[in-house]
Amino acid sequence: MEIKARFEVVYYVEVLQFLEELDFKTRSKILYNIDKARYSLDNNLFKKLTGTDVWEFRTLYNGKQYRILSFWDTETTTLVVAAHCFIKKTGKTPQKEIERTQDIMKQYFKQK
């Protein structure tokens, strides 16, 4: 029996550039967690931010919290667009990071 991914992920250039700047082990761990989140419902890996349409891929590695903020595009297929990323330094996701992702989301659907 083949296990199917729950969604596909498309990466914005900003996310790809962020990942390229990381060392190999950190980048591998983040990509592993994203792939794992595609097959399971684990809030430690992929979680909706309260009160928004923004979701975050979550990775804790070597004491740093890496976040890739995303949104769903369900018009064609179930798809998560990974829009923006950062290293989290506070307990809550900063509002400016959420707003940046929401701006990317608006631009994405406007261009579509």
Image: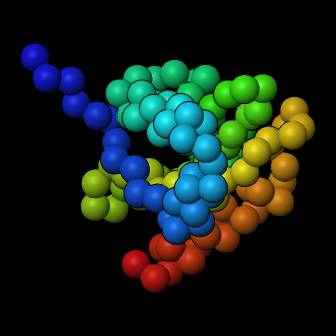
| Quarter location, residue 10 | bottom left
Provide residue 79's location: percent of width, then percent of height.
Answer: 37, 52
Q: Residue at x 14, y 23 (%)?
A: 2
Front residue of 19/101: it is 19
Extreme residue toward the left, this view: 1
Provide residue 21's location: percent of width, then percent of height.
Answer: 63, 55
| Quarter location, residue 95 | bottom right
- Residue 57 appears in view: no
- Residue 50 appears in view: yes
| Quarter location, residue 40 | top left
Provide residue 102's location: percent of width, then percent of height.
Answer: 66, 63
**Rendered view: 12 above or below 107:** above
Extreme residue toward the right, this view: 90
User: Split into 4 quadrants, where in the image is the N terminus?
Assistant: top left
Q: Residue at x 67, y 43 (%)?
A: 67
User: Split into 4 quadrants, where in the image is the C terminus?
Assistant: bottom left
Q: Is residue 37 left or right of residue 102?
A: left
Q: Residue at x 79, y 41 (%)?
A: 88
